[in-house]
Amino acid sequence: MPEAIDIQLKKGALELCVLALLSQHDSYAYEIASRLADPIGMGEGTIYPLMRRLQNDGLVETYLVESSSGPPRKYYRLTEAGKTSFSSQKTAWTSFSHAVEDILGGVA
């Protein structure tokens, strides 16, 4: 059962983590997946569908950048709606995580 909880926690936080990374700088999906692989254990197979959904929802937009090591890379950047969503999600996460920490701190 703990594995199911771990998976659900990661799924719930993934969009927020991607938006946080993109709030720092534009990036391509493989780079995002690489940055999330160790800290939260998410890989490429999870990132690409999420990036498509974020684009369909108008939270990110894409542009191509020529690459010296192959075809052009598709970069993602936050839209204004994406910046607003990130701010809102960050506030909600902070409030929620503090509440959980308070509850866990009171448990022996």
Image (cartoon, rainbow, N blue to C red):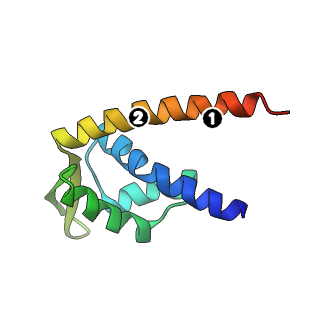
Label 2 or label 1, whichever lies nearer to me, is: 1
Report the residue that reaches farthest toward the right: 108
Q: Secondary structure at mark 2?
A: helix
> In the displayed structure, does residue 74 sit left or right of residue 5?
left
Residue 82: where, in percent of width, then height?
A: 24, 43
Query: Can you identify the residue that label 2 sits on?
Result: 90
Query: Can you identify the residue that label 1 sits on?
Result: 100
Q: Residue at x 42, y 71 (%)?
A: 45
Q: Quadrant of residue 66?
A: bottom left
* Numbered badge on residue 71: none
Quarter occupied by the C terminus: top right
Residue 51: where, in percent of width, then height?
A: 29, 60
Q: What number of labels is visible?
A: 2
Vertical placement of residue 62 versus 70, above or below: above
> In the displayed structure, does residue 66 sit left or right of residue 89?
left
Q: Residue at x 17, y 43 (%)?
A: 79
Q: Residue at x 50, y 29 (%)?
A: 95
Look at label 1 and name its amino acid: Val
Q: Quadrant of residue 21?
A: top left
> In the displayed structure, does residue 59 sit left or right of residue 107?
left
- In the image, 3 versus 21, the foreground residue is 3
Q: Residue at x 80, y 33 (%)?
A: 107
Look at label 2 and name its amino acid: Lys
> In the displayed structure, does residue 47 sit left or right of residue 64?
right
> Which numbered disc flags the more N-terminal residue, 2 or 1?
2
Q: Secondary structure at mark 1?
A: helix
Mark-to-mark CA distance, 2 and 1: 15 Å
